[in-house]
Structures are given as C-alpha cells and as structure tokens.
Amino acid sequence: MERLLTDRNPLPDTVDPRIAAQLGFIVEVDRLKTVVRQSPLAAASRRENDAEHSWHLALMVILLAEHADEPIDVGHTVQLVVVHDLVEIYAGDTPLYDDVGARTQEARERAAADRLFGLLPADQAAGFRALWDEFEARETPEARFAKAMDRLEPLLLNWMARGGTWQTPGVTADVVRARKAHIGAASAALGATARAIIDEGVRRGWVAEAEHTLDGQSAAPPA
C-alpha cells in the first residue's frame, strides 16, 4: 500500500492529534488534483482532473438549484458533490462509457472509502462516509440533484469539444441518453436541455445515432 503523503514530511509532534489527523487528510486529498478524467476541458487542450470536476459541480449546484424538481438544501448538496469523487484518489476514475471498469467500480470505491475516510477523526470519518454513501444511494433529493450535476457537467464539456467521449467506440446517442437519464430524474427542465444537446450533437455528426453492422443494419448499443 502506498504511503501517505505526510509520511514524506510528518507534521510536528507538537500539533494537536485531532488537528494533525485533519491536516493529514487535507494533504492526502491533494492527490485528487492528479486524477485525470476523460472529459476534455472547454478552455484548454487537455482533460480535466477530479478536483476541477468537483469544483465545477459545486458551482453548478449553486447556480442550477432553482431547476430541481424537489426542494433541496444547497449547502448539503454542495457537500455531496465535493466529497463524492474523493475515493478516486485510490480507486481511480472509471469513465462513464467503460463497461469493463464498471464491473469492479463499486468494490474498488468502497475499499477506497474505507481507507481514505478512516484517516479522519472518528466523528468526521463517519460524517464523510455518510455523505459518500448518500450520494451513491441517490435516495434523497440532494443526492439525486448531485448525481444530475455529475452527469450534466461532462455533457457540456463534450458538447464544447464537438463530441469528446461521445466518440468512444461503441457509444451511440441512445447510450448517451440512457446514461444521462439521472439528469431528468432530478430536473425535468435540465433533462430536456440535456436531450436537446444530445439531439443536436447527433444532427451535427458528433455522436452516432446508432451503430451499424456490415450489412448496414442497426446494431444494439452496449448495455
């Protein structure tokens, strides 16, 4: 197992143990800045990292909360989107259209959550884990809206890239629509917007409407 970042340069022994644990966690999650995602940035010719993604989601929650179909606690929803990808520090990013990686994603991320949140004082470890579990379960209005933002942000980046990851082999418009359904589940208005963006992407040739076999017949999209 890889050493913690603070093992390279431990904090002074005179630091209060609770503060030392909190600062150690803050240092460790600096790793999030190094986890590169598949989504291309709109403002530069590189891919975004998880820290940038999480910041963007937090801003989106603040801006777009008015479109939620159910009343949400904006502050709590921001907490969910800030915490939800921290586990990728150890589990790595699993791209939305990576069906092979998705098979082990849950197990990898749960193990990562155990390790990462366990660095915190017990009360905060429980609180952070509860936020992560809430996001994953999507059983609250806040978690549903947080998940919607998590699916909307890369949709916008792919639009700006004139396709981006929509051009992954095997990905069709129907696959994109299905995997963006979480948006409409939290906001009818944003769901309709997402569908309009996808439909226009099809019209412009940035995402295929359907796969075709050698005989020209449409093939079923991947599950």
Image: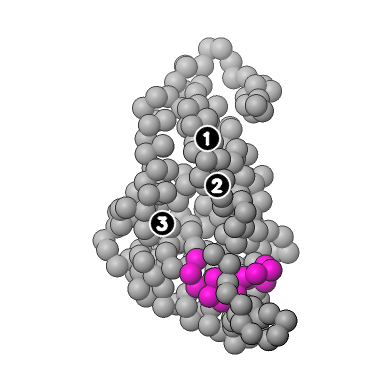
Q: Is residue 78 magenta?
A: no
Taking depth in this image into account, of 1 and 35 the one nearest to the observer is 1
What's the residue type where badge 1 is placed? Answer: Ala
* Residue at which label 2 appears: 105
Q: Is residue 173 magenta?
A: yes
Q: Mark 1 falls on what kind of element?
A: helix
Q: Mark 3 falls on what kind of element?
A: helix
Q: Earlier in the sequence, mark 2 or mark 3?
A: 2
* Residue at which label 3 appears: 146
Q: CA distance from mark 2 to mark 1?
A: 10 Å
In the displayed structure image, the side of residue 131 where residue 167 appears, left or right: right
In the displayed structure image, the side of residue 25 where residue 71 appears, left or right: left
Mark 1 Cα shell of 10 Å, populated few (<14), some (14-19), many (≥20): few
What's the residue type where badge 2 is placed? Answer: Gln
Taking depth in this image into account, of 202 and 29 the one nearest to the observer is 202
Q: CA distance from mark 2 to mark 3?
A: 19 Å
In the displayed structure image, the side of residue 4 where residue 214 appears, left or right: right
Residue 160 visible somewhere in the drawing? no
Q: Main secondary structure of the magenta part?
A: helix
Q: Which residues are magenta?
A: 166-179
Residue 158 on image: x %, y %? 61, 70
What's the residue type where badge 3 is placed? Answer: Ala
Q: Residue at x 49, y 38 (%)?
A: 110
Q: Residue at x 70, y 85 (%)?
A: 215
Is 64 above or below relative to 22?
below
Is 58 above or below relative to 212?
above
Q: Are marks 2 and 3 in contact (CB under 8 Å)?
A: no
* Residue at which label 1 appears: 111
Q: Residue at x 67, y 67 (%)?
A: 168
Q: Residue at x 30, y 57 (%)?
A: 141
